[in-house]
Amino acid sequence: MTAAAPEPKANMGQPVPRYDAAAKVTGRATYASDMPLDNPAYAFLVTSAIAKGRIDGFDLDDARGVRGVIDIVTHENAPKLKESKLFSNGGYAGTTIQPLKSADIAHDGEIIAVVIAESYEAAREAANRVKVSYTAVAPSASFDSPGTTTAAAKGQNSQFKEDPEVGDFAKAFDQAEVKLTASYDTPTQHHNPMELFTTSCAWMGDNLVIYEGSQYVYGLKNGVAEQLGIDADKVRVVNPYVGGGFGSRGSMTPRTAIIAGIAKRLNRPIKLVPTRDQGFTIATYRAETRHEIRLGAGRDGKLAALRHEGSEVSSRPDAYCVGGTKTTTRLYACPNVSSLVSIVRADRNTPGFMRSPPEVPYLFALESAMDELAVKLNMDPVELRRINDTTVEPIGGKPYTSRSLMACFDEAAKAFGWSQRSPQPKSMSDGDWLVGYGCAATCYPTQMAPSAARVRLQRDGRTRVEIAGHEIGTGAYTVIAQTASERLGVPLEKVAVFVGDSDLPPAPVAGGSNSTASTCSAVMMVCDQIRQRLFKAVMPGDSLADKAKETVGISQTPSTQAAKSDRPLDLDKAFDALGVGVVEEYGEWKPEGAPLDSFAAMHSGHARLVGGHSMKYKIAYAFGAEFVEVRVDRFTHEIRAPRLVGAFAAGRIMNPRTARSQLMGGLIWGMSSALLEATEIDERNARYVNDNLADYLVPVNADVPGVEVILLSEQDDHINPAGVKGLGELANVGTNAAICNAIYHATGQRIRKLPVRLENIEV
Amino acid sequence: MRPFSYQRATDPDLAVQALSAAAAANNPLTQAAAQPLAGGTTLIDLMKLDVMRPAALVDINPLASGWSAIESKGDGLRLGALAKMSDVAAHTEIQRNYPVIANSLNLAASAQLRNMATLGGNVMQRTRCSYFRDVSYENCNKRNPGSGCAAMDGVNRMHAVLGTSDQCIATYPGDFAQALIALDAMVEITGRSGTRNVPFADLHKAPGSTPDIETTLQPGELISAFSVPGRWPRSVYLKARDRQSYEFALSSAAVALDVQDGTIRDARVALGGVATVPWRAREAEALLKGQKFDDDLAQRVAAAAFADARGRQHNSFKIALGKRVVARALQQAVTMEVRS
Ligand SMILES: Cc1cc2nc3c(=O)[nH]c(=O)nc-3n(C[C@H](O)[C@H](O)[C@H](O)COP(=O)(O)OP(=O)(O)OC[C@H]3O[C@@H](n4cnc5c(N)ncnc54)[C@H](O)[C@@H]3O)c2cc1C
Ligand code: SF4
């Protein structure tokens, strides 16, 4: 085993190489834009240079003069589309701002024209030649701008139903022996997945095929059908590989229906490739947030009072918010809790999910505050977490299905060498570098959603699994193949997996880290249906369900006591008995507690996620602990994080290789978020300034010399059949606070605003 | 990008001819209809962004056979304008006798870019000002003379604090130029009437009231070589930046010293990331000459280097940062081990 393929511990699958590894490293993996189209025309977007106001007119002469231009679509001649509701209000869209509907502009970079031409180059050149005259109105850019409106999230966002509270915070805080009040800020961030926000639309008669990187092919299919006013069965979304999503492709963006409508009108396939900077405004982003945390504790470190107030920016029409208080109010044992989330409306595009949407900003605040409290108490920050560890969340008194937080702290502390830390700030250095150690907890809710799957087994053991899941780089193909191979007892090489196509059985959105739990649970269930059919054929009299459950697999020797008396199932005999060449099963799985309309919703592109804190009798989260070494140059104040160590427990680990890769990427992302990433907004005109990958900084290899991921064994039988807690969004949550805590240790300076840049350090 | 013609120049005369033919009177070089193409890592980017719209590209790479030599002859250095950044940075004589040059190149851009980019293109690279590079902003005096400056009261963290004017505060982004200006390099320019040599310090022009005019190079002229007098084994390039690699300087210092028996005989200090043009801090140098080095002197030198600095809303930190970078670079140069 190598670092990349960690030795599996108890309740872990094999670290088999990725199903799609060879295709990816040889360039054979086909992304949406790689799909061949028959005689396509090319689209290039023109986007607004003002954030608020209206278009007075276009001068298109120069653009029309470019050879190869076919059409220029503006609000004056755009295809009429039906409005789409926000995903949280029963719709599919990530924004209700529908471009090309009128001359009004709602945000910077809104699509205001689409140039269609015979080549990409001609479309782009003509787009550059489009002249627009505007009447601009002074926009509100963000928190401090005049003209914003603020209101509580509760009551305006249907997914944020209440501000969690318990006990009497005010009294407990008032009486607490040790108190802390501190404010924290997080910046605007953009996902910047490698794959641009492309889309290709091709009609065959009344049927539409969309090639687009999507984290939810069923949502997109239904959403576009609704906007076009056609039957959803006539729309197919295909994307066997997605070049990164991070949430940006979870809900429908306006571009798709626009391109589909133009393709229909021109009766020609159209391929749109927007630029990197357009991606900042035609899709979603993580909005900036502000927090105030109040903690009251006894001298023994026991939390007595906790209040978390968060405010978040959203667009004028849409009340998007992440509301991470649902997690921060439940993380530690604390009898008196209150919270409030507010939304500030500005002239911006609507924000949306970005990797661990609620937890990243809200845990940054809480886990920084916990470190500050530890300093006030003169206590080791790990011990403070231990003192306040709990198996029951304080708001509803529900038990965690499993919680290995302190085990993670202990494992990570050991691997990191936490005991070598001298607790005093500014007490460690190495040459020009001030050295600091810091840590923080990380967590992410375990979520599941209804999913269907179809599995077909041939006599020779060849197996085909079909499910409209999504390979966003996480390893979906691999873990689905492993699940079928294990459940049916067929060799991995014989399993073929098909995902990323809305003609396959529905799977939920690849978001909220629910994919592995949901799709693998569905695949397991359908594999069991196959086993039962085969067993029934050879052993008609027996208690079949039990046998199928207890027997390890087809053509394998049973290992459990109950099944000892059985001989392994002989595939040939079973197929002979059935009298068929192929056994195929389709099934629909839903998690415990899923609402009644779950399956209908699943087919119409609405994922009913359950889990986290929203279950009736329990609460399910994955946990981890993260330790970082930060170095601050005493002359230049440059900040580097040469060592990131994380230990994580997330139920059954399907594949330690792909799991490690997710968690490693998360740690690096978290470091990036703490030290580098921020979308700069020009306050005067509410426009994004550094909207490219040269100016929107993400780490390069030299920034991450040491990343260590430790996977802990954890078994949880209370979450889903697969026993899986999602981990795709687990690792990037704690890192922000861990880094700021380490900076405090290195410099004695507490920084409460992200990202931390060298100008924020005063030593 | 707009359509353009492409021509390979197989000898310098052809290149000069092709470039001069398209040159209209009064147009500054940056707006000339024909532009030389070297590595293309700046030029093609700016064309894709629609910032530069040349009608013709004259590819000068075929001249590499004559224009890319690296010659280090005892007491001086000559570098062809088409030498690749990576080749110069890896040259052992340059690493030994001109570490400031090797490091200014090695710490710039990424390995891929350094393999592609040339020295001539490098010194001619244009500012990274976000408003300059985004044509949807009307007001940029450099791109659109007389239109105003969006950066002045906009997001200006990366902008200059030295050599600015009320017309433009864009930073000259390059690293290598700081080494050249520090070492009194000469630049060899090839034009219609043959070649001429000018001090590198006279190549770039501060923005003043004409930020669109960036150099004294005329349309039809090409940089063919750089020469550096003397040897500077005691020299360093220190670069402070947001990430460990592949990032422009927030502040950098090129320092070269001649120290004999503890006394500084000659000193050169140039500043990057903080000024509108390659920046020589002569007042600071004057304080060093004839002195023995100590921390107090370093502080005074650093203060002198930034005496005229003017910050704006987001970039004032560069003044304090720049001083610390200068002081630290001086310390490093004084204490570095030099093999004679
Ligand atoms: C993402 C990124 C990061 C970067 N980071 C850094 C950095 O940290 N530090 C740094 O110093 N640079 C950095 N650069 C800039 C890079 O070093 C330059 O793009 C490169 O050196 C330009 O060289 P080139 O040969 O590709 O020039 P080209 O793009 O071919 O030309 C640049 C300009 O110079 C003109 N030109 C070219 N050759 C000549 C000549 N011989 N005579 C007259 N005019 C000429 C061209 O017409 C053009 O206008 C970065 C670039 C990128 C894209
Ligand atoms: S700083 Fe210079 S380049 Fe930038 S916007 Fe102002 S005038 Fe243009």
Image: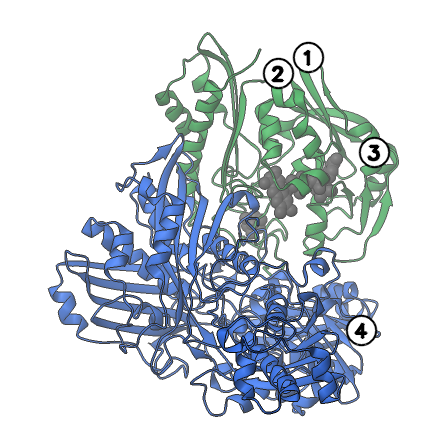
Chain colours: A blue, B green
Q: CA distance from mark 2 to mark 1?
A: 8 Å
Q: Are marks 2 and 3 on the same chain?
A: yes
Q: CA distance from mark 4 to mark 1?
A: 62 Å
Q: CA distance from mark 1 to mark 3?
A: 26 Å
Circles 2 and 1 in contact, beta carbons < 8 Å? yes
Q: Which residue is mark 3?
A: B63
Q: Amino acid under label 2?
A: Arg
Q: CA distance from mark 3 to mark 4?
A: 42 Å
Q: Which residue is mark 2?
A: B231
Q: Is residue A450 left or right of residue B217?
A: left
User: What SS does tag 2 mark?
Assistant: loop
Q: Is residue A353 left or right of residue B125?
A: left
At 65% across and 70% down in the image, what residue appears? A213
Q: Which residue is mark 1?
A: B74
Q: Position of residue A754 (x, y in %)?
A: 40, 55
Q: Chain of mark 2?
A: B
Q: Position of residue A590 (x, y in %)?
A: 50, 84
Number of on-image labels: 4
Residue mark closest to the camera, 3 vs 4: 4
Q: Which residue is mark 4?
A: A37
Q: Are marks 1 and 3 on the same chain?
A: yes
